Image: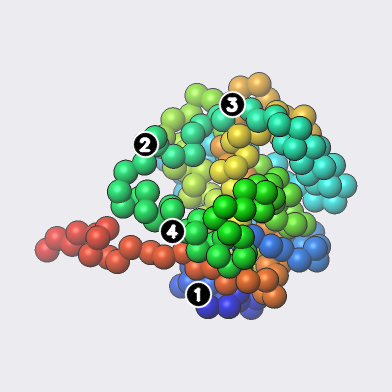
Amino acid sequence: MPLSTSKSVTVSDALDTRITVRKFRDTPVPEDTLMTIMEQARRTASGGNLQPWQVHVMTGQTLKDFVADGVKYATEGNQDEPTHPAYPSPLWEPQRSWRYKLGEDMYKLLGIAKDDKFGRMAQFLENMKFFGAPVGIIITADKRCQAPQHMDVGIYVQSLMLLAREHGLHTAPQGWWRNWPTVCEKFLDIPEEQEVIVGMSLGYGDPDVAVNDLRADRAPLSETHKFYS
């Protein structure tokens, strides 16, 4: 299914056309559009109305400097202790197979062979560049937050993704940034009691690159849902 660049007019369409975009156009997002998305996302539900998220939104020169510093930091062989691991270890089935297949499908579209370690590393580094998006977002929360508050942050991220589609934009949620808190703390006003939870790329997805045709498989309802009556 080709990448949709149209504005979504229903929640169903936003969900159906939302993908993790891995290549953005450099077209700037209008400031009023960005502010509208952020203003509307404030209505996201959270347990006890704690609203545990702190949202750092970068554009322009700040984003360019952030990316340049991050790429330099990573290519010099640095990596921080993650604020939280990306996955449980070891990962069990069927989750292990879902994750493996997504990676293989992505690299196939990119034309990067399994044994092309340099090519895979270069693509991995695109995360540090926010995949070329004109808006880079880092979301932090208090270190005292626990699983329910992290779930709230996830709900907030979903709000951003769906609102982006309403404006003809796309996103890439990025757990990647949990591995690079040093870069985030260098450029952003992150209090000591806060930690990086997740990041996001936001902008106009490029429909002319093959990797943006990737649609991750989904398990059938019969495997993930039980209905009671």
Q: Which residue is mark 4?
A: 101
* Label 2, label 1: how far apart the Cα atoms are: 35 Å
Residue 52 in the image: above or below residue 218: above
Disc 3 element = loop
Q: Residue furthest top?
A: 192
* Label 2, label 4: how far apart the Cα atoms are: 17 Å
Q: Residue 53: name its quadrant.
A: top right
Nearer mark to the viewer, of 3 and 1: 3
Residue 169 image point, x, y percent: 66, 67
Residue 131 image point, x, y percent: 70, 55
Disc 4 element = helix
* Number of residues whose C-alpha sits closer than 10 Å to that of mark 2, classed few (under 14), some (14–19) or many (20 or more): few
Looking at the image, is mark 2 or mark 4 earlier in the sequence?
2
Nearer mark to the viewer, of 4 and 1: 4
* Label 2, label 3: how far apart the Cα atoms are: 18 Å
Looking at the image, is mark 4 or mark 1 earlier in the sequence?
1
Which of the labelled discs sits on residue 81, or is there none? Answer: 3
* Number of residues whose C-alpha sits closer than 10 Å to that of mark 1, classed few (under 14), some (14–19) or many (20 or more): some
> Callout 4, which amino acid?
Lys
Nearer mark to the viewer, of 4 and 3: 4
> Callout 2, which amino acid?
Pro
> Callout 1, which amino acid?
Asp
Which of the labelled discs sits on residue 13, or is there none? Answer: 1
Looking at the image, is mark 2 or mark 1 earlier in the sequence?
1
- Tag 2–tag 4 contact (CB < 8 Å): no
Q: Which residue is mark 2?
A: 90
Residue 222 in the image: above or below residue 151: below
